Amino acid sequence: MEADSAASPNPGAPEPQAVGAPSTIGSLLCRIRGKVFTWNILKTIVLGQLLSLCICGTAITSQYLAEKYKVNTPMLQSFINYCLLLLVYTVMLAFNSGSDNLLDILKRKWWKYILLGLADVEANYLIVRAYQYTTLTSVQLLDCFGIPVLMALSWFILRARYRVIHFIAVFVCLLGVGTMVGADILAGRDDNSGSDVLIGDILVLLGASLYAVSNVCEEYIVKKLSRQEFLGMVGLFGTIISGIQLLIVEYKDIASIKWDWKIALLFVAFALCMFCLYSFMPLVIQVTSATSVNLGILTADLYSLFFGLFLFNYKFSGLYILSFTVIMVGFVLYCSAPTRTAEPAESSVPPVTVIGIDNLGLKLEESGLPDTHSAVL
């Protein structure tokens, strides 16, 4: 009995492991909550979904024009958007002084912005044109090709360095897209096989790659130069390039439009949605990255599907809800961990950017540097 008492002086006391395990789990949950449920991530989610709604608006208006009024003029619709950017942001550049003036920018970098404008215009055109040749499923799946291209370009051009969790997050988002495509097939939305699937698939891949090029350039310009310069120069050269292409490929389609106030209103709605998308996307990219923005807007197709339930009599599937949930989980995972930016030793970039320009707001919040965050942004 004495030996037993000595071995166990307090038989009623809990084992040390029983106390440590719950505390360890609780600590882990607190850390996860501290990384995921933050103001910056919430703000990024909200802004990303606003961009998705803008894309949804462009898709709905385009589909309504095509199905109800037989109007297929993607270049004309893009031309109106570029004209709005020209009237707002390019004019603002014209009134700037010093190195931010429009003429000074054109003297130094005119050929670079011509290439950027060409990539942006053709990316929009190729994706829309692909729907005439291939299936909806192919467009939705192959359009995701732009995400790995974007990550690769960010690695080499922006020197972004990803963690394992970022690749897991991208995989989760693409899994959500696969779920959405499966729901489309089950709902019978993929009946049209297109006239030439191979041509359509190639157009999607080219368009997605050009989107990636445009987005990487946008992130670089927005973070290194200014949002106004990007929008102003894209508006200028986008208007010129899309205007020329419009006269070449769509003049017959435009001439055949029987204009009335409903068609005009749909064109205005499309242009406003696209203008808001172009205006707000740089703001989101400033605090996150082009990659995280592209992951967030994967939900745009789902919003279009939800609206299509009422406008185009789509069939509902519970897989759409599952797909939305999976994409959002992947998006939050990606945003929860800031990436690192590798700068060369001789770089003249300010020291604060060494911690990473991707998801910079999240990193600064973790470090408790709100003043620095405001100064940088």
Image (cartoon, rainbow, N blue to C red):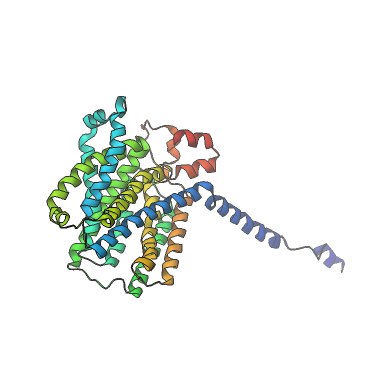
Residue furthest toward the top? 98
Please give the name of the residue rendered at 27% of the width and 39% of the height, measured from the top-left corner. 86
Q: Is residue 89 visible?
A: yes
In this picture, residue 196 sits left or right of residue 279: left
- Up the image or down, 335 lies above or below 316; here it is above
Residue 97 at x, y = what percent?
31, 25
Vertical side of 315 occupied by 234: above or below: above
Image quadrant where one finds the C terminus: top left
The residue at the point 21 percent across, 45 percent down is 118
Horizontal and vertical percent position of residue 210: 25, 50
Res 171 → quadrant: bottom left
Q: Quadrant of the N terminus?
A: bottom right
- Toward the right, the furthest residue is 2
Q: Is residue 134 left or right of residue 324?
A: left
> In the rendered image, which quarter is residue 85 located in?
top left
Number of numbered discs: 0
The residue located at (19%, 42%) in the rendering is: 240
In the displayed structure, does residue 147 sit left or right of residue 364? left
Q: In front here: 94 or 257?
A: 257
Q: Residue 60: image x %, image y %? A: 32, 60
The answer to which of 202 and 102 lies nearer the viewer is 102
How far across and down, in percent of the image, does residue 177 sit?
Answer: 37, 63
Residue 178 shows in this picture:
no
In the image, 313 versus 101, the foreground residue is 313
Q: Against 64, is 374 above or below?
A: above
Residue located farthest toward the front when viewing the structure as drawn: 261
